[in-house]
Amino acid sequence: MDFLTEIFVLGMPVIAIAIYYFAFYNKSNDDYWRKLPTLPEYLAEHPECVTDDDENARCCHCHSDKVIFQPLTCHEDPRYKHFCLNCKRVLFRSKSIL
Ligand SMILES: [Zn+2]
């Protein structure tokens, strides 16, 4: 292996790890996510938001039941944020079990 190939082979995993790190574990993203309440914490604070679905809740701001979730960063991110489709406010967090 010549020197440049070696740099390339050794460098790729480092670059991949760096991209992974910045996409998933970017500190401000993670801090933001950790500050969101979990569903049980959210429901404890807003008992009026309990719904029939024990995996979901109503919006505590506008009382809409259109609360949807999406990954915090990219598709592979196991951290989810749940937000109100009506008023667009982020309500609580969850983590994919995968
Ligand atoms: Zn709302």
Image (tube, grey):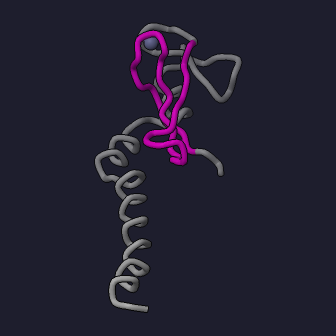
Above or below 32: residue 83: above
Magenta stretch bounds: 66-95
In magenta stretch: residue 69: yes
Q: Residue furthest front?
A: 2
90 or 76, which is in the foreground? Answer: 76
- Estimate the x, y position of residue 35 in percent, counting from the top left: 36, 40
Residue located at (47% from left, 31% from top): 92
In magenta stretch: residue 28: no
Residue 27 is left or right of residue 77, and the answer is left
- Estimate the x, y position of residue 16 in percent, counting from the top left: 42, 65
Residue located at (33% from left, 89% from top): 3
58 or 50, which is in the foreground? Answer: 58
Above or below 6: residue 11: above
Above or below 39: residue 74: below
Instruction: Report the image quarter containing ligand 1.
Output: top left
Q: Residue furthest right?
A: 52
Q: Quadrant of residue 10?
A: bottom left
